[in-house]
Amino acid sequence: MKTIAVIFGSRSAEHDISIVTALSAIIKPLEATKKYKIEAVYIAKDGSWYWDEKLKDIKLYQSGAIDEFMRKAPKVQLQFDNGLTLVKSSQFAGRKAYKKIDVVFPATHGTHGEDGELMGLLEMANVPYVGCDVPSSAVAMDKVLSKLQTQAYGIVSPKMKFFTKSEYSENVEGWLKAIKTDLKMPLFVKPARLGSSIGITRVENEKELVNAIEVALHYDEKALVEEAVANLIEVTVPIIGNDELIPASVEQPLPKDDGVFDFETKYMNQGKGGKKMSGGKAGAQGYSKIPADISKDLYDKSLETALGVYKAVGCQGIARIDLLIDSKAKKVYFNEINPLPGSLYNHNWRASGWSNVDLVTRLVDLAEERWNAKQKLTTTFSTNFLKQF
Ligand SMILES: Nc1ncnc2c1ncn2[C@@H]1O[C@H](COP(=O)(O)OP(=O)(O)OP(=O)(O)O)[C@@H](O)[C@H]1O
Ligand SMILES: [Mg+2]
Protein backbone atom coordinates (compact mmCIF):
# COMPACT_ATOMS: atom_id res chain seq x y z
CA MET A 1 0.00 0.00 0.00
CA LYS A 2 1.39 3.40 -0.97
CA THR A 3 1.83 6.09 1.65
CA ILE A 4 0.64 9.59 0.84
CA ALA A 5 1.49 12.57 3.02
CA VAL A 6 -1.09 15.35 2.89
CA ILE A 7 0.57 18.62 3.95
CA PHE A 8 -1.66 21.51 5.02
CA GLY A 9 -1.98 24.67 7.14
CA SER A 10 1.13 26.88 6.99
CA ARG A 11 1.85 30.58 7.49
CA SER A 12 -0.92 31.95 5.34
CA ALA A 13 -4.09 34.02 5.58
CA GLU A 14 -5.78 30.93 4.11
CA HIS A 15 -4.49 28.58 6.85
CA ASP A 16 -7.98 27.51 8.01
CA ILE A 17 -9.29 26.98 4.49
CA SER A 18 -6.33 24.69 3.88
CA ILE A 19 -7.37 22.53 6.86
CA VAL A 20 -10.79 21.99 5.30
CA THR A 21 -9.34 21.30 1.85
CA ALA A 22 -6.97 18.72 3.36
CA LEU A 23 -9.40 16.96 5.69
CA SER A 24 -12.60 16.88 3.68
CA ALA A 25 -11.57 17.15 0.04
CA ILE A 26 -8.32 15.17 0.08
CA ILE A 27 -7.78 12.87 3.08
CA LYS A 28 -11.35 11.52 3.25
CA PRO A 29 -11.62 10.50 -0.41
CA LEU A 30 -8.03 9.16 -0.45
CA GLU A 31 -8.82 6.95 2.53
CA ALA A 32 -12.08 5.86 0.91
CA THR A 33 -10.08 4.30 -1.94
CA LYS A 34 -8.49 1.85 0.54
CA LYS A 35 -5.50 1.98 -1.83
CA TYR A 36 -3.38 4.35 0.20
CA LYS A 37 -2.18 4.91 3.76
CA ILE A 38 -2.59 8.60 4.53
CA GLU A 39 -0.29 10.58 6.82
CA ALA A 40 -1.55 14.00 7.94
CA VAL A 41 1.20 16.63 8.16
CA TYR A 42 0.09 19.93 9.66
CA ILE A 43 2.12 23.14 9.45
CA ALA A 44 1.01 25.41 12.30
CA LYS A 45 0.58 29.17 11.99
CA ASP A 46 4.06 29.60 13.47
CA GLY A 47 5.58 27.31 10.84
CA SER A 48 6.12 24.25 13.10
CA TRP A 49 5.43 20.86 11.50
CA TYR A 50 3.41 18.05 13.15
CA TRP A 51 2.51 14.55 11.96
CA ASP A 52 -0.18 12.56 13.73
CA GLU A 53 -3.38 10.58 13.16
CA LYS A 54 -5.21 13.01 15.47
CA LEU A 55 -4.60 15.78 12.92
CA LYS A 56 -7.20 14.17 10.64
CA ASP A 57 -10.05 15.21 12.94
CA ILE A 58 -11.64 18.60 12.21
CA LYS A 59 -12.81 18.80 15.85
CA LEU A 60 -9.22 19.19 16.98
CA TYR A 61 -9.07 22.57 15.24
CA GLN A 62 -12.68 23.61 15.93
CA SER A 63 -12.43 23.06 19.66
CA GLY A 64 -9.09 24.78 20.09
CA ALA A 65 -7.65 21.47 21.36
CA ILE A 66 -4.99 21.91 18.70
CA ASP A 67 -3.11 24.29 21.05
CA GLU A 68 -2.94 21.63 23.74
CA PHE A 69 -1.94 19.04 21.12
CA MET A 70 0.90 21.24 19.89
CA ARG A 71 2.22 21.83 23.41
CA LYS A 72 2.69 18.06 23.89
CA ALA A 73 3.31 16.66 20.42
CA PRO A 74 6.81 16.20 19.02
CA LYS A 75 7.66 18.25 15.94
CA VAL A 76 8.42 16.52 12.67
CA GLN A 77 11.85 16.18 11.16
CA LEU A 78 12.22 15.60 7.44
CA GLN A 79 14.79 13.18 6.17
CA PHE A 80 15.92 13.64 2.57
CA ASP A 81 17.00 10.20 1.36
CA ASN A 82 16.47 10.60 -2.38
CA GLY A 83 12.88 10.59 -1.29
CA LEU A 84 11.15 11.87 1.80
CA THR A 85 10.89 10.24 5.21
CA LEU A 86 8.93 11.74 8.09
CA VAL A 87 10.65 11.36 11.45
CA LYS A 88 9.40 12.10 14.98
CA SER A 89 10.05 11.01 18.55
CA SER A 90 7.87 8.04 19.44
CA GLN A 91 6.17 7.19 22.72
CA PHE A 92 9.10 4.86 23.49
CA ALA A 93 11.84 6.95 25.07
CA GLY A 94 14.84 7.44 22.83
CA ARG A 95 13.16 5.72 19.86
CA LYS A 96 11.98 7.48 16.74
CA ALA A 97 9.10 6.81 14.38
CA TYR A 98 9.91 6.84 10.65
CA LYS A 99 7.59 6.87 7.65
CA LYS A 100 8.82 6.79 4.08
CA ILE A 101 6.50 8.78 1.83
CA ASP A 102 5.62 7.64 -1.70
CA VAL A 103 3.65 10.70 -2.82
CA VAL A 104 2.99 14.11 -1.25
CA PHE A 105 -0.35 15.83 -1.71
CA PRO A 106 0.14 19.53 -0.88
CA ALA A 107 -3.09 21.09 0.43
CA THR A 108 -1.73 24.52 1.29
CA HIS A 109 -3.32 27.74 0.08
CA GLY A 110 -1.58 31.10 -0.30
CA THR A 111 1.80 32.09 1.10
CA HIS A 112 4.44 29.54 2.18
CA GLY A 113 2.81 26.67 0.35
CA GLU A 114 0.82 27.37 -2.79
CA ASP A 115 3.47 29.84 -3.99
CA GLY A 116 6.11 27.25 -4.87
CA GLU A 117 8.04 27.23 -1.59
CA LEU A 118 6.76 23.83 -0.48
CA MET A 119 7.21 22.45 -4.00
CA GLY A 120 10.89 23.47 -3.89
CA LEU A 121 11.37 21.41 -0.75
CA LEU A 122 9.64 18.42 -2.38
CA GLU A 123 11.76 18.74 -5.54
CA MET A 124 14.91 18.73 -3.40
CA ALA A 125 13.68 15.55 -1.70
CA ASN A 126 12.90 14.06 -5.14
CA VAL A 127 9.51 12.80 -3.99
CA PRO A 128 6.49 12.76 -6.35
CA TYR A 129 3.93 15.44 -5.43
CA VAL A 130 0.52 16.54 -6.66
CA GLY A 131 -0.08 19.80 -8.49
CA CYS A 132 1.85 22.70 -9.95
CA ASP A 133 5.65 22.69 -9.78
CA VAL A 134 7.99 25.41 -8.48
CA PRO A 135 8.02 27.84 -11.43
CA SER A 136 4.33 27.50 -12.33
CA SER A 137 3.28 27.96 -8.68
CA ALA A 138 5.51 31.00 -8.26
CA VAL A 139 4.34 32.61 -11.50
CA ALA A 140 0.70 31.81 -10.74
CA MET A 141 0.89 33.54 -7.36
CA ASP A 142 2.31 36.75 -8.88
CA LYS A 143 -0.37 38.78 -10.67
CA VAL A 144 2.26 40.66 -12.71
CA LEU A 145 4.37 37.65 -13.75
CA SER A 146 1.33 35.54 -14.66
CA LYS A 147 0.00 38.31 -16.91
CA LEU A 148 3.38 38.91 -18.57
CA GLN A 149 3.92 35.21 -19.16
CA THR A 150 0.46 34.66 -20.68
CA GLN A 151 0.73 37.82 -22.79
CA ALA A 152 3.81 36.28 -24.39
CA TYR A 153 1.45 33.51 -25.58
CA GLY A 154 -1.09 35.97 -26.97
CA ILE A 155 -3.53 35.79 -24.06
CA VAL A 156 -5.25 39.07 -23.28
CA SER A 157 -5.44 40.57 -19.79
CA PRO A 158 -6.52 44.09 -18.75
CA LYS A 159 -4.00 46.77 -19.77
CA MET A 160 -1.65 47.36 -16.83
CA LYS A 161 1.34 49.19 -15.34
CA PHE A 162 3.41 47.70 -12.54
CA PHE A 163 6.22 48.85 -10.29
CA THR A 164 8.13 48.07 -7.13
CA LYS A 165 7.89 50.24 -4.03
CA SER A 166 11.26 51.84 -4.70
CA GLU A 167 10.60 52.43 -8.40
CA TYR A 168 7.36 54.17 -7.50
CA SER A 169 8.72 56.28 -4.62
CA GLU A 170 11.63 57.52 -6.75
CA ASN A 171 9.27 58.91 -9.38
CA VAL A 172 5.72 59.28 -8.08
CA GLU A 173 4.77 62.09 -10.50
CA GLY A 174 6.19 60.17 -13.45
CA TRP A 175 4.22 57.02 -12.63
CA LEU A 176 0.97 58.91 -12.05
CA LYS A 177 1.39 60.71 -15.36
CA ALA A 178 2.16 57.45 -17.20
CA ILE A 179 -0.89 55.78 -15.65
CA LYS A 180 -3.11 58.75 -16.58
CA THR A 181 -1.83 58.85 -20.14
CA ASP A 182 -1.82 55.12 -20.88
CA LEU A 183 -4.71 53.69 -18.83
CA LYS A 184 -8.40 54.55 -18.80
CA MET A 185 -10.30 55.05 -15.49
CA PRO A 186 -11.79 53.26 -13.61
CA LEU A 187 -8.76 51.25 -12.54
CA PHE A 188 -7.97 48.40 -10.17
CA VAL A 189 -4.88 48.71 -7.97
CA LYS A 190 -3.53 45.46 -6.50
CA PRO A 191 -0.60 44.11 -4.53
CA ALA A 192 1.15 41.67 -6.91
CA ARG A 193 1.31 38.61 -4.67
CA LEU A 194 -1.64 38.60 -2.28
CA GLY A 195 -5.05 36.95 -2.48
CA SER A 196 -8.53 37.20 -1.00
CA SER A 197 -8.91 40.77 -2.32
CA ILE A 198 -6.56 42.07 0.42
CA GLY A 199 -5.16 45.50 -0.46
CA ILE A 200 -7.18 45.76 -3.71
CA THR A 201 -8.99 49.03 -4.56
CA ARG A 202 -11.14 50.12 -7.48
CA VAL A 203 -10.44 53.79 -8.26
CA GLU A 204 -12.27 56.43 -10.27
CA ASN A 205 -9.89 59.40 -10.08
CA GLU A 206 -6.30 60.45 -9.40
CA LYS A 207 -6.77 61.19 -5.72
CA GLU A 208 -8.15 57.71 -5.11
CA LEU A 209 -5.37 56.31 -7.25
CA VAL A 210 -2.62 57.80 -5.07
CA ASN A 211 -4.20 56.36 -1.91
CA ALA A 212 -4.84 52.99 -3.52
CA ILE A 213 -1.21 52.64 -4.62
CA GLU A 214 -0.09 53.42 -1.09
CA VAL A 215 -2.42 50.74 0.26
CA ALA A 216 -1.20 48.13 -2.26
CA LEU A 217 2.45 48.91 -1.55
CA HIS A 218 1.74 48.59 2.15
CA TYR A 219 1.03 44.88 1.55
CA ASP A 220 3.61 44.04 -1.09
CA GLU A 221 6.89 45.36 -2.52
CA LYS A 222 5.29 45.17 -5.97
CA ALA A 223 1.94 46.53 -7.18
CA LEU A 224 -0.02 46.70 -10.41
CA VAL A 225 -2.59 49.13 -11.75
CA GLU A 226 -4.94 47.83 -14.43
CA GLU A 227 -7.99 48.95 -16.36
CA ALA A 228 -11.35 47.76 -15.03
CA VAL A 229 -13.23 45.38 -17.30
CA ALA A 230 -16.65 46.91 -18.05
CA ASN A 231 -19.98 45.01 -18.17
CA LEU A 232 -18.33 42.43 -15.99
CA ILE A 233 -19.16 38.75 -15.80
CA GLU A 234 -16.63 36.69 -13.84
CA VAL A 235 -16.07 33.04 -14.62
CA THR A 236 -13.63 30.41 -13.41
CA VAL A 237 -12.41 27.19 -15.03
CA PRO A 238 -10.91 24.29 -13.04
CA ILE A 239 -8.50 22.20 -15.11
CA ILE A 240 -6.54 19.02 -14.44
CA GLY A 241 -3.74 17.37 -16.37
CA ASN A 242 -0.05 17.47 -17.15
CA ASP A 243 0.18 17.34 -20.95
CA GLU A 244 -3.34 16.27 -21.81
CA LEU A 245 -5.69 18.78 -20.19
CA ILE A 246 -9.24 18.20 -18.96
CA PRO A 247 -11.34 21.24 -18.06
CA ALA A 248 -14.36 20.98 -15.75
CA SER A 249 -17.34 23.27 -16.42
CA VAL A 250 -16.98 27.02 -16.84
CA GLU A 251 -18.42 28.25 -13.54
CA GLN A 252 -19.86 31.65 -12.77
CA PRO A 253 -19.42 32.78 -9.18
CA LEU A 254 -22.28 35.10 -8.29
CA PRO A 255 -21.29 38.75 -7.69
CA LYS A 256 -19.84 39.25 -4.23
CA ASP A 257 -22.52 41.75 -3.17
CA ASP A 258 -25.22 39.26 -4.11
CA GLY A 259 -25.11 37.78 -0.62
CA VAL A 260 -22.42 36.99 1.86
CA PHE A 261 -20.75 33.66 1.27
CA ASP A 262 -19.47 32.83 4.65
CA PHE A 263 -16.95 30.13 5.37
CA GLU A 264 -19.71 27.58 6.05
CA THR A 265 -21.44 28.11 2.72
CA LYS A 266 -18.32 28.26 0.70
CA TYR A 267 -16.24 25.47 2.16
CA MET A 268 -18.19 23.23 4.53
CA ASN A 269 -21.37 22.25 2.71
CA GLN A 270 -19.78 20.62 -0.27
CA GLY A 271 -20.69 17.08 -1.02
CA LYS A 272 -23.62 17.02 1.38
CA GLY A 273 -26.77 15.82 -0.30
CA GLY A 274 -24.98 15.46 -3.64
CA LYS A 275 -27.30 17.89 -5.40
CA LYS A 276 -26.88 18.05 -9.11
CA MET A 277 -25.90 21.45 -10.43
CA SER A 278 -27.11 22.38 -13.86
CA GLY A 279 -29.13 24.65 -16.06
CA GLY A 280 -27.97 28.07 -14.91
CA LYS A 281 -29.40 27.58 -11.45
CA ALA A 282 -27.41 28.41 -8.36
CA GLY A 283 -24.98 25.59 -7.67
CA ALA A 284 -25.26 23.21 -4.76
CA GLN A 285 -23.19 25.63 -2.75
CA GLY A 286 -25.57 28.43 -3.61
CA TYR A 287 -22.89 30.81 -4.71
CA SER A 288 -22.27 30.00 -8.33
CA LYS A 289 -23.79 28.87 -11.59
CA ILE A 290 -22.55 25.69 -13.23
CA PRO A 291 -22.37 25.97 -16.17
CA ALA A 292 -21.94 29.73 -16.46
CA ASP A 293 -24.91 31.62 -17.83
CA ILE A 294 -23.15 32.95 -20.94
CA SER A 295 -23.45 32.49 -24.71
CA LYS A 296 -21.89 29.45 -26.36
CA ASP A 297 -19.38 31.73 -28.01
CA LEU A 298 -18.24 33.23 -24.69
CA TYR A 299 -18.27 29.79 -23.05
CA ASP A 300 -15.96 28.39 -25.73
CA LYS A 301 -13.72 31.47 -25.61
CA SER A 302 -13.48 31.10 -21.82
CA LEU A 303 -12.46 27.46 -22.11
CA GLU A 304 -9.90 28.26 -24.78
CA THR A 305 -8.42 31.15 -22.76
CA ALA A 306 -8.24 29.11 -19.56
CA LEU A 307 -6.54 26.16 -21.29
CA GLY A 308 -4.12 28.61 -22.94
CA VAL A 309 -3.23 30.15 -19.58
CA TYR A 310 -2.67 26.73 -17.97
CA LYS A 311 -0.29 25.74 -20.79
CA ALA A 312 1.48 29.11 -20.99
CA VAL A 313 2.32 29.08 -17.29
CA GLY A 314 3.19 25.37 -17.32
CA CYS A 315 0.65 24.36 -14.69
CA GLN A 316 0.51 20.65 -13.85
CA GLY A 317 -1.85 18.42 -11.93
CA ILE A 318 -4.53 20.95 -11.14
CA ALA A 319 -5.27 24.68 -11.23
CA ARG A 320 -8.23 27.00 -11.59
CA ILE A 321 -8.15 29.93 -14.00
CA ASP A 322 -10.21 33.07 -13.24
CA LEU A 323 -11.43 35.16 -16.15
CA LEU A 324 -13.13 38.55 -16.53
CA ILE A 325 -15.64 38.92 -19.36
CA ASP A 326 -16.83 42.17 -20.91
CA SER A 327 -20.31 40.92 -21.78
CA LYS A 328 -21.06 43.74 -24.23
CA ALA A 329 -17.74 43.73 -26.09
CA LYS A 330 -17.82 39.90 -25.86
CA LYS A 331 -14.17 39.86 -24.80
CA VAL A 332 -12.55 37.44 -22.37
CA TYR A 333 -9.65 38.64 -20.20
CA PHE A 334 -7.35 36.54 -18.07
CA ASN A 335 -7.41 37.59 -14.40
CA GLU A 336 -5.55 35.10 -12.23
CA ILE A 337 -4.52 31.51 -11.55
CA ASN A 338 -5.17 29.50 -8.39
CA PRO A 339 -2.70 26.60 -8.39
CA LEU A 340 -4.58 24.80 -5.61
CA PRO A 341 -8.28 25.68 -5.74
CA GLY A 342 -10.06 25.52 -2.35
CA SER A 343 -11.43 21.98 -1.77
CA LEU A 344 -10.04 21.23 -5.27
CA TYR A 345 -13.23 22.89 -6.53
CA ASN A 346 -14.71 19.41 -6.22
CA HIS A 347 -18.31 20.70 -6.49
CA ASN A 348 -17.55 21.67 -10.07
CA TRP A 349 -15.83 18.37 -10.86
CA ARG A 350 -18.85 16.55 -9.43
CA ALA A 351 -21.04 18.50 -11.87
CA SER A 352 -18.85 17.05 -14.65
CA GLY A 353 -19.30 13.53 -13.31
CA TRP A 354 -16.10 13.21 -11.27
CA SER A 355 -16.49 11.95 -7.70
CA ASN A 356 -14.09 13.18 -5.01
CA VAL A 357 -12.43 9.77 -5.16
CA ASP A 358 -11.99 9.94 -8.97
CA LEU A 359 -10.47 13.39 -8.61
CA VAL A 360 -7.87 12.68 -5.91
CA THR A 361 -6.92 9.32 -7.47
CA ARG A 362 -6.33 10.95 -10.84
CA LEU A 363 -4.24 13.69 -9.21
CA VAL A 364 -2.02 11.14 -7.44
CA ASP A 365 -1.57 9.27 -10.76
CA LEU A 366 -0.63 12.54 -12.49
CA ALA A 367 1.96 13.25 -9.78
CA GLU A 368 3.56 9.84 -10.31
CA GLU A 369 3.46 10.17 -14.11
CA ARG A 370 5.28 13.51 -13.92
CA TRP A 371 7.85 12.17 -11.45
CA ASN A 372 8.52 9.06 -13.58
CA ALA A 373 9.04 11.20 -16.68
CA LYS A 374 11.46 13.40 -14.76
CA GLN A 375 13.55 10.47 -13.55
CA LYS A 376 14.38 9.69 -17.19
CA LEU A 377 16.11 13.06 -17.63
CA THR A 378 19.86 13.22 -17.24
CA THR A 379 20.85 15.32 -14.24
CA THR A 380 24.54 14.42 -13.93
CA PHE A 381 27.39 14.89 -16.34
CA SER A 382 30.83 13.25 -16.06
CA THR A 383 33.77 15.61 -16.45
CA ASN A 384 37.50 15.58 -15.79
CA PHE A 385 37.16 18.83 -13.91
CA LEU A 386 38.20 17.54 -10.48
CA LYS A 387 41.32 15.82 -11.82
CA GLN A 388 42.90 19.22 -12.54
CA PHE A 389 43.26 19.94 -8.84
N1 LIG B 1 -9.54 44.54 -14.02
C1 LIG B 1 -10.67 44.29 -13.35
N2 LIG B 1 -11.86 44.67 -13.85
C2 LIG B 1 -13.01 44.43 -13.19
N3 LIG B 1 -13.07 43.83 -12.00
C3 LIG B 1 -11.92 43.44 -11.43
C4 LIG B 1 -10.66 43.65 -12.07
N4 LIG B 1 -9.70 43.16 -11.27
C5 LIG B 1 -10.32 42.68 -10.18
N5 LIG B 1 -11.65 42.84 -10.26
C6 LIG B 1 -12.64 42.46 -9.24
O1 LIG B 1 -12.00 42.33 -7.98
C7 LIG B 1 -12.02 40.96 -7.54
C8 LIG B 1 -10.72 40.62 -6.83
O2 LIG B 1 -9.63 40.76 -7.71
P1 LIG B 1 -8.55 39.61 -7.91
O3 LIG B 1 -9.23 38.37 -8.29
O4 LIG B 1 -7.51 40.13 -8.82
O5 LIG B 1 -7.95 39.54 -6.46
P2 LIG B 1 -7.76 38.39 -5.38
O6 LIG B 1 -6.85 38.95 -4.37
O7 LIG B 1 -7.40 37.15 -6.03
O8 LIG B 1 -9.13 38.30 -4.70
P3 LIG B 1 -10.18 37.10 -4.63
O9 LIG B 1 -9.51 36.05 -3.82
O10 LIG B 1 -11.33 37.78 -3.97
O11 LIG B 1 -10.43 36.69 -6.03
C9 LIG B 1 -12.29 40.15 -8.80
O12 LIG B 1 -12.89 38.94 -8.47
C10 LIG B 1 -13.22 41.10 -9.55
O13 LIG B 1 -14.53 41.06 -9.00
MG1 LIG C 1 -9.51 36.47 -7.59
Image: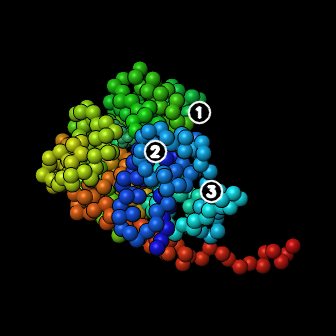
Q: Is residue 71 above or below residue 4?
A: above
Q: Residue furthest top?
A: 207
- Mark 2 C-beta closer than 8 Å to ligand 1: no
What is the three-letter code of the residue carrying label 2?
Leu
Can you see residue 81?
A: yes
> Element at badge 1?
helix
Which numbered circle lies on residue 60?
2
Q: At x 26% / y 63%, what residue is drawn?
A: 354
User: How far apart are the alpha carbons under marks 1 and 2?
Assistant: 44 Å
Please identify the residue farthest to the left as the structure is shown: 279
Picture coordinates of residue 126, whole percent (x, y)? 58, 67
Q: Nearer the viewer, mark 3 or mark 1?
A: 3
In primary-sequence order, the first of circles 3 and 1 is: 3
Relative to the observer, which residue lies in front, 240 or 354? 354
Give the residue pinned by disc 1.
166
In the rendered image, the vertical position of residue 31 relative to residue 169, given as above or below: below
Cβ atoms under marks 2 and 3 closer than 8 Å? no
Disc 1 residue type (three-letter): Ser
- Mark 3, residue position: 91
3 and 1 marks in contact (CB < 8 Å): no
Instruction: Tell me if 263 is positioned left or right of 384 in this view.
Output: left
Scheme of image coloration: rainbow
Q: Around disc 1, counting alpha carbons within 10 Å, would you say few (fewer than 14), some (14 to 19), or many (20 or more)? A: few
- Helix, strand or loop at label 3? It is loop
- Mark 2–mark 3 Cα distance, whole angstroms, equals 20 Å
Label 3: how many Cα within 10 Å (few below 14, some 14–19, many 20+): few
Nearest to N terminus: mark 2 or mark 3:
2
Q: Quarter holding the C terminus?
A: bottom right
Q: Where's residue 248, x and y in %? A: 27, 59
